[in-house]
Image: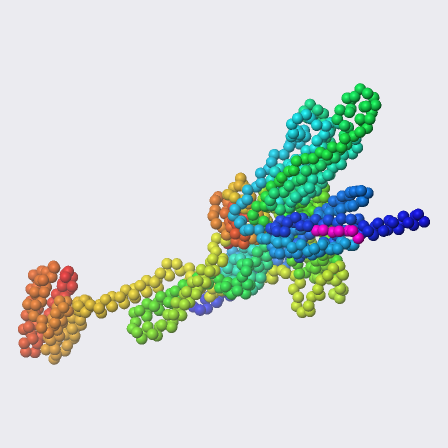
Amino acid sequence: MMILPLLAAVLALPLHAAPYDDAKAAYDAGDYDQAASAFESLVEAHPGDAALRYDLGNALLKAGKLGRASASYQRAFDLDPRDGDGRHNLDFALKRAGEELAPPGVPGPAFAAFTALSARELAGLHWLAAWAAMILAGFALLGGPERRARLQDWLLAAAGAWLLFGLWWAGLRAVLPSGRGVITAARAELRNGPGEKFTVGYTAPEGRRVRVLSESGDWLEVGLLKEGVKGWTLASSVEKL
Amino acid sequence: MRLAALAILLLHASAAAAAELTVSATLNSARAFVGDQLVLSVSIAGSGSASPRVPPIPDVEIYESGKSQSMSIVNGAVSSRVVYTYVLNPQKAGRYVLPPVEVAGAAPTAPIAFVIEAVPADPLQAAPPPAQAPSAPAGAPPPQRPSAGPAPDAFVTATLDKGKAFVNEQVTLTVRFFTAVPLLGAPQYDAPKLTGLLAENLGAEGQGTTVIGGRSYNYSELKSALFPVQAGRATVGPAVVTVQIPRRGAIGSGDDFFDRFFNAAAPEARRLQTDPLALQAEPLPPGVPEDFSGVVGALTVEASADRTQAKTGEAVNLTVVVSGVGNIKSLPEPKRPDLPSVRFFDSESSVKLERIGEKVGGSKTFKTVIVARVSGPLEIPPFSVSYYDPAKRAYARAQSKPVRLSVLPGDPNAALPLVGGGSTPAPGVTEVAADIRYLKGPTGSSALADALAGFGRRGPWHAAPGVFLLAALAVVLRRRALAADPRARRSRFARETAEGRLKQAEAQPEAERARATALLGEAFTGYFADKLDLAAASLTLKAITQRLQARKTPPPAASLDGVRNVWNELDQLRYAPGGADRAEIRRIAAEIRELMQAFDKEPR
């Protein structure tokens, strides 16, 4: 039975590798649009592969599509935040749009430590610790004093981990909230309402990260995370993460 | 000899004049906000043609805005005064000191301290746009002279095209001089004194004729573009025109030829002046972009290099031209891209102003020398400049196209051209170009991360440990409750205890019939003793029936009869030799079970 997954992985490798080689060849030849298209197909087939999303970001950035590149890097970062190359390229793309990966005032190493675990990993660890803490507490309650004494250290450790991962997860969700997006238009106009008849209050450069606050037809209300301002822009100007 | 004496006299006079050269420097305000402009006036009184040298101030852009010169002769003494105007454009908040301004041949000025404050952040509260005063339509006749009374021979008016404007937004000042009589000599015009405003002459003067109050006037007009330098009230002082006109009544009024002749030859000097004007300068709306240039108008940016191919270490001239409408003169240099692979040298700027309709505009050219450090394709990212577009009432950004160069390997030992300063990079690993890192290749997803993520997505399953914990808690509480109430505990476990004894009785071998019989008795009496909270040792049939009948819902008579029957049977067997046989024991045990089942079901 153990052989089956291994066999499947081995069989899958050539299927994966051939399109990848084509995409890489296009990238190396400077045909970035072709490379981006090929990487996009690979990402669709393997959505959980952070490295493929990173490669797609590279091809999009070289093709001059800063916004879409930034979105792809961000997705790669969400999947594998510990990848140094992914962090570097995301930061590079964000700087092109006047932002940085680490929030203003937060030292880079501190932010790197804070984001060492992804939100999905923290969610899993949080629930794992919660299960352990509650099951241990249940057994400790049902057992006598001896069992309670034996389980006490494990219970404290599980409860501490539950608290730690829970707070960490909540903090990460505050810094990297859901409903994020990236400006993909060359210069998105943020209006005071969902329509052309409203005046343009701000313009946002391509690649700038936004938070999608609400939707109305073809319009999205977005908030600029860095400046703390908001406005309405066409949904086609934003790629939701 | 007389010539030598004259030369000595002239030299002495010029030396005396140089000795009397005095310089003063004044700032229009000692306190302003970031984004405001301060106006520095350096006044040089005396003779000489020396220009002031305004020292640079870190984080403050300084631009020369023009100069004005005046000369006067009082009692035969000639004195001149040149006022150089500079615009100071602070980039950051802080306390600054303008070092002494130096002029050759004169004592330096005293340092001037000023404070720049950060703009109060209030991004959500939008400032209302300044009300635009209606401007006169093109081709409209010149305005009527406001004063009543008989139409004068000559007068002068001054108007602004709007009463409110943003800081650095153009306001057009029109000064019109009207005359109904021929002038004796050229009029002398003294420009109005401006407070809080910078002026640019719009050049061409308009002329024409008009009829005011039934009298025909020739008029000429002079337009100037004014730019408020900071928010608040700005003023335009009186504009003065001094004219020589024929004395009133002289022309054609006398009958005598000589009278007419001499009166016509005696001109009358008139000093005409306008009323002062006020302008309300409004701060720009919030949301100022980081690369805001301070210009209110419309701009375009173009960037170009003098070649498309160069070698590493070779100097390439890069030109960035910002052109458009607005106060171009005060435009700062667009921010250079941060390119470690390229060395930028100091840039030089030049301004070309021109009149574009009623607006002042032009272009400002920034020329710099760049040197590529590494070979390969080089792309210098676009230069961008933000400005405020009053027509759209929004900030806008003008951006050039990227400049692309093909850099070939040069002489690795060649020194960089000596164009400007710069430090030699330290030996070792030096980052020469920031770029993205190369492809990674598929790595698949992390099994551990996927497992954790999958576990985290279990949703309703995460309630399971909570349910288990609550169940455990319920069990513990129940246990505690039973431990605290022995009567309830006996009642709760009465049937369980009796069942154990019945099974023991049924399991007794044939030889232990007496023991089995005793166990049946213990099961029966023990059950009722526990249920009714009585002592098993002193339990009697009467006590059982009395307690059962005393219940809120007494058991049916059949059940009581069953109790009596079993009690009596057990009583007989207790004294029977050898006790009951196995079949009898099973039968009685079954009867006891039925009774227990019946009593457990009945309400107490």
Is any atom of residue B392 visible in this view? Answer: no
Relative vertical location of residue B147 with respect to residue A10 in this rendering, above or below: above
Is any atom of residue B119 visible in this view? Answer: yes
Is A171 contained in the magenta span?
A: no
Q: Nearer the viewer, residue B464 or B472?
A: B472
Is B20 contained in the magenta span?
A: yes
Quadrant containing the C terminus of chain B is bottom left
Check the image and tell me how it is coloured: rainbow
Where residue B448 sits: x, y (%)? 46, 66
In the rendered view, does A35 fall on the left or right side of B268?
left
Where residue B43 sits: x, y (%)? 73, 49
Where residue B334 sits: x, y (%)? 66, 52
Farthest right residue in view? B1
> What's the residue at 57%, 58% (across, down)?
A100
In the rendered view, does A171 fall on the left or right side of A207?
left
Farthest front residue in view? B75
> What's the residue at 68%, 56% (across, down)?
B111
- Magenta residues, as a range? B19-25
> What's the residue at 55%, 44% (across, down)?
B127
Question: Residue B554 is drawn in which quadrant?
Answer: bottom left
Relative vertical location of residue B483 with respect to residue B290 in this rendering, above or below: below
Where residue B124 sits: x, y (%)? 52, 48
Q: How many marks?
A: 0
In the rendered view, does B461 fall on the left or right side of A7?
left
> What's the residue at 72%, 25% (across, down)?
B216
In the rendered view, does B533 fall on the left or right side of B289?
left
